[in-house]
Amino acid sequence: MNIRKAASVASTGTPDAQQLKKINLYSKTPLNAEQVYCFSVRLCDDQPDRDFERFDTDALPVLAELFRGKTGIVDHDWSAERQIARVFDTEVLCENGAHYIRAWCYLLRTEKNADLIAEIEGGIKKEVSVGCAVKSTVCSVCGKPYGSCEHRKGLVYDGQLCLAVLRDPADAYEFSFVAVPAQREAGVMKKAEGGVCMTLQELVSKSGTPDLCDSLNALEREAQFGRDCRKAMLRETVSLGLLLDFGADEAVLQKAFSALSSAELSVLKNGMAQKAAALFPSTPQLPAAKGASGTLDTAYII
Ligand SMILES: [Zn+2]
């Protein structure tokens, strides 16, 4: 599952000797401090985000490791020429109870990068987003794999907000400077990358208009009515099966008829009702109908 999250450039600086040593582990030719521009980025943390998701605290050290050596790009452009910054060190820090990954990055002080450096220094390029993959997502309420239980993220259960907890990082891809910060608000990026699965209800409650929410609610009520009708029809068909003595008990009939579509069930029920009416003229078509029990008993005696 691919995940994309917002992050930010936390600070900037010139590399010291120790940092330069680490940078040179990643550079093809040895660099000196003057050739390199160094800055740090706050990547993922373990706090709930606007999508009601959070990284598992235990996942952060693994992710931090995976982000080492990865590149930073502008505008999500994947072409090699645009891969301009590289993560040379990462650490997991704790601040006000929140754990987060700080990544130290460098880029070359070339003419091509001059604008970007100026923008980082000026605080213009401070929004970045990160991409990574996780193997599992669990429900924060019950701990089951998210989507397999009845809890939905963003909803409150017994005073507890349900979150999807991202666990078991598999890979870290890159971080991107986001030219238009508003883009990351959309949550579209994650979807476009085949990210987190979403129910229709979640999608509408998150991105839908009040009208869409109303119409989804109306559809849900109608669907419930449909389910109730099917249940009643199934009950009647099982009763008819017993009346016509199909040679199977109620549980078996129930199981067999449940496999039919509603249209098939309806055809079967009508056919069986006609047969029952022909065989037992005094028996009403619907055994459950008013005053049916007395006649039904007689029918069984016959
Ligand atoms: Zn759950």
Image (cartoon, helix red, strand yellow):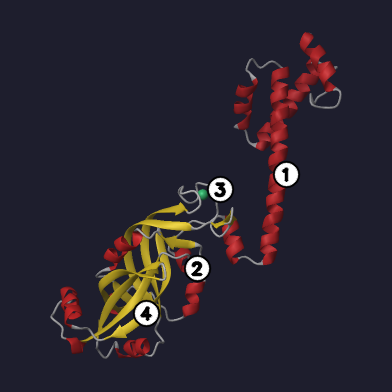
For marks 4 and 2, the one nearer the N-term is: 4
Query: Which of labels 4 and 2 is toward the front?
Result: 4
Residue at image location 20% in from the left, 83% down from the top = 16
Three-letter amino acid code at disc 2? Gly
**Circle 4 SS class:** strand
Which residue is under mark 4? 9
Local crowd at mark 3 within 10 Å, few (<14), some, or many (≥20)? few
Three-letter amino acid code at disc 4? Val
Residue at image location 78% in from the left, 15% down from the top = 279
Which residue is under mark 2? 187
For marks 2 and 3, the one nearer the N-term is: 3
Which percent across, then down, holds residue 31?
A: 15, 83
Which percent across, then down, holds residue 86?
A: 26, 76
Which residue is under mark 1? 225
Q: Distance between the residues labelled 4 and 1?
A: 53 Å
**Circle 3 SS class:** loop
Which percent across, then down, holds residue 1?
A: 40, 57
Q: Where, by quadrant of the figure, is residue 108 drawn?
A: bottom left
Q: Nearer the viewer, residue 239 or 12?
A: 12
Q: Distance between the residues labelled 1 and 2?
A: 34 Å
Q: Distance between the residues labelled 3 and 4?
A: 38 Å
Residue at image location 42% in from the left, 68% down from the top = 5
Three-letter amino acid code at disc 1? Phe
Query: Which of labels 2 and 3 is toward the front?
Result: 3
Query: Which of labels 1 and 3 is toward the front?
Result: 3
Residue behind label 3 places its C-beta within 8 angstroms of ligand 1: yes
Which residue is under mark 3? 150
Q: Distance between the residues labelled 2 and 3?
A: 23 Å
Query: Viewed as shown, does residue 287 lie left or right of 27?
Result: right
